[in-house]
Image (spheres, rainbow, N blue to C red):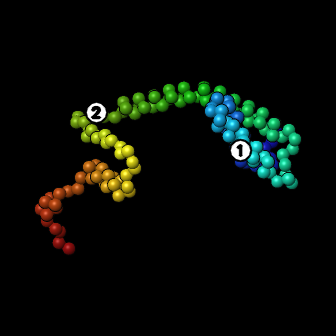
Amino acid sequence: MTDEGVPREILRTLRRICLWRELERDASAVAAEQRRLDDLVAALPAASPLPPGHLAALRRTEQDRAASAAALSEILAPLLVERLELAAAALTSRRPNRATPGPVPRRRERPATPLPIADLIDGMLAQEAEANPRPSRQSLSTTKPTPP
């Protein structure tokens, strides 16, 4: 079945419905997408409606694609996890041991309400100052200026 002449938004919505059903997602989300699909189909211009049976054929095609995608993800996900664990182990084995541990990051509690932007900027500047300390004024005054 070809997708020609079918609006892209109808195909995307149909694809989401089929995938969510295959993955056994929340039934209310699937029902909402089905209502969206019905609205999109109803909103098609009278001059270019979907031929009879075309939507059903598209649904079957998308159901097959969703089933294939779900089966493939069940196979590939464990392989991907294995590869990522091996890559992480290889990276940690290449790192040199540090004689002195670095600074321990302080854990800050989050406020119950969002901070104003000024407080966020102040916090960012404080973190930057901790990470990149500036030379003291005394060390700057002891350096001799170079003649022009």
Q: Position of residue 106 (x, y in %)?
A: 28, 41
Q: Position of residue 136 (x, y in %)?
A: 17, 57
Amino acid type assigned to the residue bearing label 1 in the image: Arg
Q: Quadrant of residue 11?
A: top right
Amino acid type assigned to the residue bearing label 2 in the image: Asn
Q: Viewer-proximal residue, 85 or 97?
A: 85
- Residue 43 relative to residue 86: left or right: right
- Relative to 36, does residue 25 appear above or below in the rendering? above
Q: Position of residue 51 (x, y in %)?
A: 87, 44
Marks 1/2: CA–CA distance: 57 Å
The quadrant in which the C terminus is found is bottom left
Q: Residue furthest front?
A: 112
Q: Quadrant of residue 103?
A: top left
User: Would you call the spot at circle 2 few (<14 residues within 10 Å), some (14-19), or many (20 or more)?
Assistant: few
- Residue named by callout 2: 97
Could you say which disc has been placed on residue 110 in the image? none
- Residue named by callout 1: 36
Q: Viewer-proximal residue, 4 or 85?
A: 4
Residue visible at 33% across and 55% down? 119
